[in-house]
C-alpha cells in the first residue's frame, strides 16, 4: 500500500522539533509516526500524518522547508519473523533495495505497520501487495 | 639598515621631481602601447603631454578591477608576449582571475623592491628565512623568495602548509625570519605547542606578515605567542605583488616605495583626492613597471597617509593599516573572496537559490580565518533522503573549493536562518555577530 509521508528539514538546534509539533497541533493534525535522521548539523524529520496535505501547508506557513513523498507501507504480523517474512525477504528476493524504514501501530486495527522507502516504489508496492494477498 | 639610501632618504623635492619624470614617461608609454589606456585618456580629454606637474595626476583616468576583467587576459599588457618571462594570477570578482605578466626587467625591479622592503623590516644576509607564502600563481611565494635571495639570506622555500614539517625545519635549520600570513603565524604557534615546541625558544626573531588585513591586537598576539617582531607588509597583484610598502622596526606605518609607486588617497564615492592624514581609498600608479603598468589603480583598500619624517630616516610616506574595503571583497587566509563568486557557485548547482550567508571568523586566536557558507535549503533541493542532502553538501563544498581556491565549510540551514533584508542583502557576517 502507498502512503503519503511528509519530510521536514531542520537544523540540529534546540526547539526545532517543538516548533514543528506546535504548528501541527495548532491545525489539529495527528502524527501517526515520526522518525528523525540526523547529522551533526541538521536533521530530516519524516512523518505520517492524519492529514498530510494540511500538515504540509501548516509547516510551510510556519517557515519550514518540506516535501511530500509517496512511500510504501505494509502490515507486519506480531510474530517472530513477522518483518522478515512479510517485508524484508520478499523485497530482497525481488531485488528491491531499502533506503529507510520505520514503523507504527495503526490504531484502527492495532496492527504494526511498516513504512519504508525503496529504490523502486512501483516494484515494492507490487511485491508487497502480492505478499499480502498470497 | 637601509638598502638604498639614495632613494629611501631622498628629499621630498628630489623624489617628486623623479616621480614626475617617471609619470610623464609612463603615461606616454601606456598611451602608445595599450589601446585601453589610449581610449581611457581620450575619453577624459587628456594626453600624456598634459602632465606638467604631479597635481596633473588628477587629470588621468582611474583603472579598476573590472578593467582587468574586461581586458582579460592580456588586454592591459604593454609588451609583446615574447618579452614576458612570468605570469602570476590571483582571484577576480567573477570566474576570471587577474593576470599579472612580468618582463625580465620587472622581475629584477620587483626583486630589488622586495630586497629593500625585507631590509626595511630588519632582515639581513645573516638570516635564515623560511618563506611560508604560497609558491605558484600567487605573487607571495616567488615575490618574497627572489627578494630574500637578493638580500643574501639562506632561503627555505617551504611554501604554505605541511605545518609539522615547517616546525621541524624551523627548529633544526635555525630559522630566524618567517615570512607568512599573520593567520598562518598563529597556526604555526598553536601546532608547535601541540608537539611540545615553544617557538619563543627557537632562533625565530622576526615575521614579515601580509596578504591579508590584521589588527594591532593580532600583532600583539603573534609577537607574544611566537616570540618575534611581526612586521606588516602590503602589496597587491594588480600593482606588483608584495612590496608596495612595509613597516620599519619603529612599527609606525608602512613606508611606500614611492620611487616606484605614486600614491593618492581619494574619496571612494566622488573620486576626489584627499589631503594627507585623511582616511580614504588608496590609489596607486606604477612608475617603473614594463609588462603591465597601471595608472591610478583603485585598490578599494581604505587607509591614510602620513608624510612626516620617520625616526628611521626614510622620507617615504607611510600608510596606516588597511582599515576596511570600499567593496565587499573578503580576504580569507590570504586569498581574495568575493560574495559574487559564491553566488555564482550556488546558482550553478541546480535549484539552489542564492540565499546564503558568509560567516567569517576574524582575528580568532590561534586559528586562521575560517570561511563558512550557510546555504538555505529550498524546496527545490530538499530530499527526504539523508544521503542526497549530504551529497548536496559535498557537491557545494567541492564546487566552492574549486572556484574560490580555498576550502569553505558548507552548512545547510533553514530559510528562517538567512535574514531577509530590504534592498541589498547583508551577505557577510562575523561569527561574533551571530
Image (spheres, helix red, strand yellow):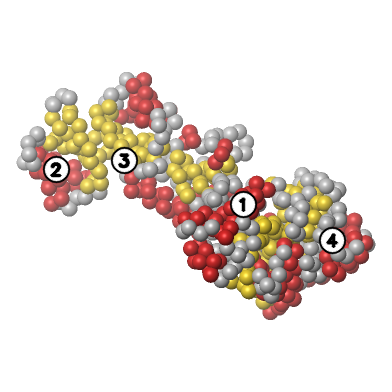
- Residue under label 2: A87
Does label 1 or label 4 sit earlier along the sequence? 1
Question: Which of the 4 image quarters holds residue B72?
Answer: bottom right
In this rendering, which labeled residue sits more in front, label 3 or label 2?
3
Question: Image height check: is A87 above or below A110?
Answer: below
Q: Chain of mark 3?
A: A
Q: Residue at x 71, y 77 (%)?
A: B104
Q: Residues within 10 Å of mark 3 (few under 14, many from 20)?
A: few
Question: Image height check: is B131 above or below A110?
Answer: below
**Residue B334 or residue B327, whichever sits in front:** B334
- Residue under label 3: A37
Q: Chain of mark 1?
A: B
Residue located farthest toward the front when viewing the structure as drawn: B201
Q: Secondary structure at mark 3?
A: strand
- Residue under label 4: B313
Percent coordinates x, y for residue B321 in the rendering: 72, 51
Q: Secondary structure at mark 1?
A: helix
Q: Residues within 10 Å of mark 2 (few under 14, many from 20)?
A: many
Q: Residue at x 84, y 61 (%)?
A: B313
Amino acid at each position: 500500500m502507498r502512503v503519503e509521508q511528509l519530510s521536514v528539514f531542520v537544523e540540529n538546534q534546540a526547539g526545532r522539533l517543538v516548533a514543528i509539533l506546535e504548528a501541527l497541533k495548532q491545525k489539529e493534525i495527528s502524527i501517526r509516526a515520526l522518525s528523525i535522521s540526523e547529522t551533526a548539523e541538521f536533521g530530516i524529520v519524516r512523518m505520517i500524518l492524519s492529514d498530510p496535505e494540511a500538515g504540509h501547508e501548516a509547516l510551510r506557513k510556519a517557515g519550514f522547508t518540506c516535501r511530500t513523498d509517496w512511500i510504501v507501507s505494509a502490515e507486519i504480523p506480531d510474530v517472530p519473523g513477522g518483518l522478515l517474512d512479510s517485508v524484508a525477504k520478499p523485497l530482497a528476493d525481488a531485488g528491491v533495495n531499502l533506503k529507510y524504514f520505520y514503523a507504527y501501530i495503526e490504531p484502527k486495527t492495532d496492527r504494526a505497520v511498516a513504512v519504508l522507502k525503496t529504490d523502486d516504489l512501483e516494484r515494492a508496492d507490487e511485491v508487497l501487495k502480492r505478499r499480502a494477498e498470497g | 639598515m637601509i638598502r638604498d639610501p639614495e632613494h629611501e632618504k631622498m628629499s621630498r623635492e628630489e623624489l617628486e621631481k623623479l616621480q614626475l619624470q617617471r609619470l610623464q614617461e609612463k603615461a606616454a608609454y601606456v598611451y602608445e602601447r595599450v589601446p585601453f589606456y589610449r581610449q581611457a585618456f581620450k575619453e577624459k580629454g587628456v594626453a600624456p603631454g598634459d602632465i606638467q606637474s604631479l597635481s596633473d595626476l588628477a587629470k588621468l583616468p582611474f583603472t579598476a578591477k573590472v578593467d582587468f576583467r574586461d581586458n582579460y587576459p592580456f588586454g592591459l599588457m604593454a609588451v609583446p608576449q615574447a618579452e614576458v618571462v612570468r605570469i602570476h594570477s590571483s582571484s577576480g570578482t567573477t570566474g576570471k582571475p587577474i593576470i599579472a605578466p612580468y618582463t625580465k626587467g620587472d622581475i629584477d625591479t620587483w626583486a630589488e623592491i622586495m630586497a629593500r622592503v625585507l631590509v626595511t623590516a630588519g632582515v639581513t644576509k645573516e638570516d635564515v628565512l623560511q618563506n611560508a607564502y604560497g609558491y605558484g600563481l600567487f605573487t607571495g611565494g616567488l615575490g618574497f623568495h627572489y627578494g630574500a635571495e637578493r638580500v643574501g639570506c639562506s632561503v627555505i622555500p617551504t611554501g604554505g602548509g605541511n605545518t609539522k614539517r615547517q616546525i621541524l625545519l624551523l627548529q633544526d635549520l635555525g630559522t630566524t625570519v618567517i615570512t607568512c600570513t599573520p593567520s598562518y603565524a598563529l597556526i604555526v604557534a598553536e601546532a608547535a605547542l601541540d608537539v611540545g615546541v615553544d617557538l619563543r625558544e627557537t632562533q625565530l626573531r622576526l615575521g614579515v606578515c601580509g596578504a591579508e588585513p590584521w589588527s594591532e591586537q593580532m600583532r600583539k598576539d603573534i609577537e607574544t605567542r611566537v616570540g618575534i617582531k611581526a612586521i606588516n607588509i602590503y602589496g597587491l597583484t594588480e600593482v606588483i605583488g608584495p612590496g608596495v610598502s612595509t613597516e620599519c622596526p619603529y612599527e609606525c606605518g608602512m613606508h611606500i616605495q614611492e620611487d616606484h609607486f605614486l600614491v593618492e588617497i581619494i574619496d571612494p564615492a566622488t573620486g576626489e583626492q584627499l589631503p594627507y592624514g585623511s582616511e580614504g581609498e588608496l590609489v596607486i600608479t606604477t612608475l617603473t613597471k614594463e609588462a603591465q603598468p597601471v595608472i591610478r589603480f583603485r585598490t578599494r583598500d581604505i587607509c591614510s597617509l602620513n608624510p612626516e619624517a620617520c625616526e628611521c630616516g626614510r622620507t617615504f610616506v607611510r600608510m596606516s593599516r588597511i582599515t576596511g574595503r570600499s567593496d565587499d571583497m573578503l580576504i580569507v587566509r590570504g586569498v581574495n573572496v568575493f560574495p559574487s563568486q559564491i553566488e555564482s557557485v550556488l546558482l550553478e548547482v541546480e535549484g539552489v537559490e542564492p540565499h546564503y550567508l558568509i560567516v567569517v571568523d576574524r582575528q580568532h586566536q590561534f586559528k586562521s580565518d575560517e570561511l563558512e557558507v550557510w546555504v538555505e535549503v529550498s524546496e527545490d533541493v530538499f530530499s527526504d533522503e539523508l544521503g542526497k542532502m549530504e551529497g548536496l553538501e559535498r557537491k557545494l563544498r567541492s564546487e566552492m573549493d574549486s572556484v574560490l581556491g580555498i576550502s569553505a565549510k558548507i552548512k545547510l540551514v533553514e530559510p528562517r536562518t538567512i535574514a531577509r533584508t530590504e534592498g541589498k542583502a547583508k551577505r557577510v557576517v562575523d561569527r561574533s555577530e551571530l
